Image (cartoon, rainbow, N blue to C red):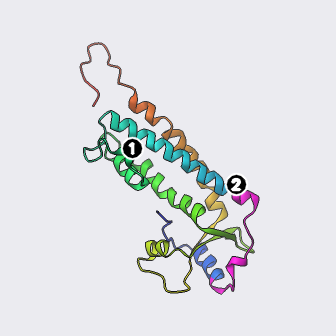
Amino acid sequence: MALPRASETERTVHLRKIVESAENVVEWPRLTDEDLLLFARIIHMYSSIDFLLRMTVEVMDQNGLVASEWRGRTAKISNMYELNRAICSGQFWNEGHRSAFAAIEEHRRARNLVAHFIARRFPNENAFIFMTKSASDFKQVYGVHPSDGTMLYGVTDAEQLAGLIPVLKGILSWLSRLPKDLSTPVVLGAGDTSQKT
């Protein structure tokens, strides 16, 4: 599971200092209905993105557009990271396409955060703390197993998380056209003898 990369800003340092001085962050305010709606939107949008990615790789496989290592195997890919690798194995993508696929995987980290971590609101800030006791999540972020009693947490501004919605809408709009575009043959003009590659 991809988790958000740690990023140091003045704001995150400020928020982490608040966490470090707090006694029991689990007792902080629970999420509001609006917060839960935001989290649900991110999770649902990623369900749609993943569905469209699977359709895309299926069309690519049917048309021989994936690298040979993936041919005939795409329906059995369960890991989204591997699925993304299969899609990106197509040699016809331009830099814009590749950037979009990279953005999908980068933003998936936020989806995993809202879907798999417990969240609380900061008492006096428009921000969230996300917490886990999962040793595997801890190891993925820090590269070592946590010591007993260690909690993995991340902090983010509520506005920053809400800013992801228009980005995901744009990705969904673009991605929704891909399966059809890939399965539509190129129409050759009069005298044009080139073929679709």
Question: On the rendered structure, is 131 left or right of 122?
Answer: left
Q: Circle 2: is it few (<14), some (14-19), or many (20+) Cα within 10 Å?
A: few
- Residue that appears at 59% across and 61% down: 115
Quarter holding residue 172: top right
- Residue that appears at 51% across and 70% down: 7
In the displayed structure, 8 sits above or below 109; it is: below
Toward the front, the furthest residue is: 76
Task: Find the magenta span and give its range.
Answer: 20-36
Give the percent coordinates (x, y) of residue 124: 75, 74
Residue 52, numbered label: none
In the rendered structure, which amino acid carries the disc numbered 2? Leu
In the displayed structure, 48 sits above or below 120; it is: above
On-image quarter of the C terminus: top left
**Between 120 and 187, the one nearer to me in the picture:** 120
**Between 10 and 27, the one nearer to me in the picture:** 27
User: N-terminal of the two: label 2 or label 1?
Assistant: 2
In the rendered structure, which amino acid carries the disc numbered 1? Ala
Q: CA distance from mark 2 to mark 1?
A: 32 Å
Tell me, yes or no, whether the highlighted magenta stretch contains residue 15.
no
**Residue 95 visible in the snapshot:** no
In the displayed structure, 172 sits above or below 138; it is: above
Nearest-to-viewer mark from 2 and 1: 1
Residue 75, numbered label: 1
Q: Secondary structure at mark 1?
A: helix
**Residue 5 visible in the snapshot:** yes
Give the percent coordinates (x, y) of residue 81: 40, 55
Give the percent coordinates (x, y) of residue 59: 39, 35
Residue that carries the numbered disc 2 in the rendered image: 37
Tell me, yes or no, whether the highlighted magenta stretch contains residue 24.
yes
- Residue that appears at 35% across and 42% down: 93
- Residue that appears at 36% across and 44% down: 74
